[in-house]
Each structure stands twice: as C-alpha cells, then as structure tokens.
Image (cartoon, helix red, strand yellow):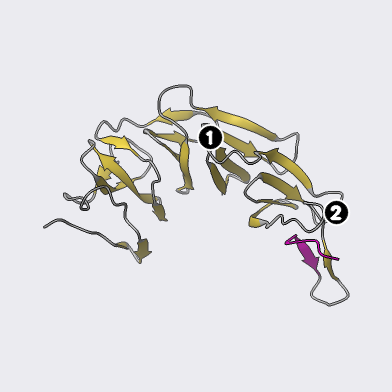
C-alpha cells in the first residue's frame, strides 16, 4: 500500500516497526519534520499543519492547519519553557502538545509585518518581524527599540549561548550582521560595512565563541 511519506514508530525491532498514522490519506505525503518533545508528546509539522502525537494512532492529532496559502509565511516550531512556539503570518502560537492548550499568544497589530523568525536564546523568545524585533518572556511581549534597523525581511539568524546573531537592513542602506541578547541596549551591528547591493548573507556559523560568515563587499 502506497501511503506516501508518513510518520512511523519503532521499538527497535522489525516486528515492532509500523506506520504510526496515515495523516494525509492515500499516496499523498505528510512529510513530517521538526519533532520537539513536550512531556509525553511530540510536536511536529509539515508545510501545511502542526501536529502532536503520543505515539499512538488515536493520539496523533492536528493542532493547527494553515492550508496552501503560499503568500503567508510559516515559521517552524521552537521549544521554550517546555512549550512549543511557531509563527504563521503575523501571529505567534503556543502549544503544550494538546489541542486545548494551543493558542495565539501574540498578534502583530501594527505595521511591523509578519513573523520572519523565532529563536530561543535561553532566556526569552526573540521574535523577528519584518520591520521590528519583539521579545517574549512566556507571558508578555515587548518591542525592542532599534531605530537603525529598517527591515529583518528573510533574516538569517543563529544562536551562540544567550547571544543571537542575525541579518537586518541598516537604515535602508543594505544588510548588516547584528547581535542581540534580547535587550535594546545590546542590539548592535557587529561590522561597519554591508554587502554589495541587497544580497543577503549566505552563511553564518558559530565556532566556539566566534562567528564565521560569508560576505560580499564592494571595496
């Protein structure tokens, strides 16, 4: 039977390995990814929905469904304080792995645009919106004061301890690499130059306490 790409479960033996659930019926694919553990559940997603499973077919349920709206951006789940958070369009969702415990905890009601990225720096969630950065402590959301940052559209970011490196546009002059610990005072550009044109950085990786990145300059 062709079930497409679906989640399987195994106890480490051939006899104990079987299809968990044919989530997308027939030969169509679910393509599950980004499994995050909360207590006895795993939260995971594909390009259309966020789901949860306790390892049983009946306990594998949909938490959110976003459909095929390609004009709205889905941001993959991250774990924070034993809950999972994910973004869709201009909203931040929180779930404890149950349908009843899944809700919107932040909605951007101003001109900052949709969610571009979410990262847990070990203290707070840092939420990159298209034209602003917000910090969520598990209860409240605060916008950082970053007047030099005009856009974080398609931002690239990477965590290093409690510090986060990310790309953002500087005063509409071009992209720079920035760093933040989730406070306005510590959100600064790490370099005084930007790439030729509007080409984003293609690579960032931490090595020990250092950052290695790719950059194209016009000098």
| Image point (35%, 49%), residue name | 166
Element assignment for label 2:
loop
Residue tagged 1: 89
Q: Is residue 11 magenta?
A: no
Return the residue found at the far top: 109
Q: How crowded is mark 2: few (under 14 residues within 10 Å), some or many (20 or more)?
A: few
Residue 188 image-quadrant placement: top left
Return the residue found at the far left: 219
Q: Quadrant where the N terminus lies?
A: bottom right
| Horizontal and vertical percent position of residue 197 | 22, 49
| Horizontal and vertical percent position of residue 205 | 37, 63
Q: Relative to residue 27, is residue 73 drawn left or right?
A: left
| Image point (71%, 54%), residue name | 30
Q: Residue 57 — which label?
A: 2
- What range is drawn magenta here? 1-10
Return the residue found at the far bottom: 14
Q: Does the magenta stretch include residue 2?
A: yes
Between disc 2 and disc 1, the foreground one is 1
Q: Relative to residue 55, is residue 152 drawn left or right?
A: left
Which of 130 and 14 lies nearest the eye of the viewer? 130
Main SS of residues in magenta: loop
Residue 153 image-quadrant placement: top left
Q: How crowded is mark 1: few (under 14 residues within 10 Å), some or many (20 or more)?
A: some
C-alpha gap between disc 2 and disc 1: 30 Å
| Image point (28%, 62%), residue name | 214
Element assignment for label 1:
loop
């Amino acid at each position: 039977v062709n079930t497409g790409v679906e989640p399987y479960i195994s106890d480490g033996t051939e006899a104990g390995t079987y299809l968990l659930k044919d989530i997308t019926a027939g030969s169509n694919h679910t393509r599950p990814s980004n499994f995050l553990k909360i207590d006895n559940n795993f939260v995971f997603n594909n390009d259309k929905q966020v789901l949860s499973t306790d390892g049983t077919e009946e306990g594998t349920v949909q938490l959110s469904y976003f459909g095929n709206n390609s004009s709205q951006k889905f941001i993959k789940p991250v774990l924070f304080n034993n809950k999972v958070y994910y973004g869709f369009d201009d909203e931040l969702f929180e779930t404890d792995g149950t349908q009843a415990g899944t809700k919107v905890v932040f909605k951007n009601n101003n001109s900052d645009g949709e969610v571009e990225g979410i990262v847990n720096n070990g203290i707070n969630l840092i939420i990159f919106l298209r034209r602003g950065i917000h910090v969520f402590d598990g209860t409240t959301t605060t916008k950082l004061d970053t007047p030099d940052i005009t856009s974080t559209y398609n931002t690239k970011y990477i965590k290093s301890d409690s510090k986060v490196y990310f790309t953002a546009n500087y005063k509409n002059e071009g992209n720079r690499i920035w760093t933040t610990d989730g406070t306005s005072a510590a959100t600064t550009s790490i370099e005084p130059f930007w790439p030729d044109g509007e080409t984003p950085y293609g690579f960032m990786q931490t090595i020990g306490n250092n950052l290695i990145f790719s950059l194209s300059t016009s000098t």
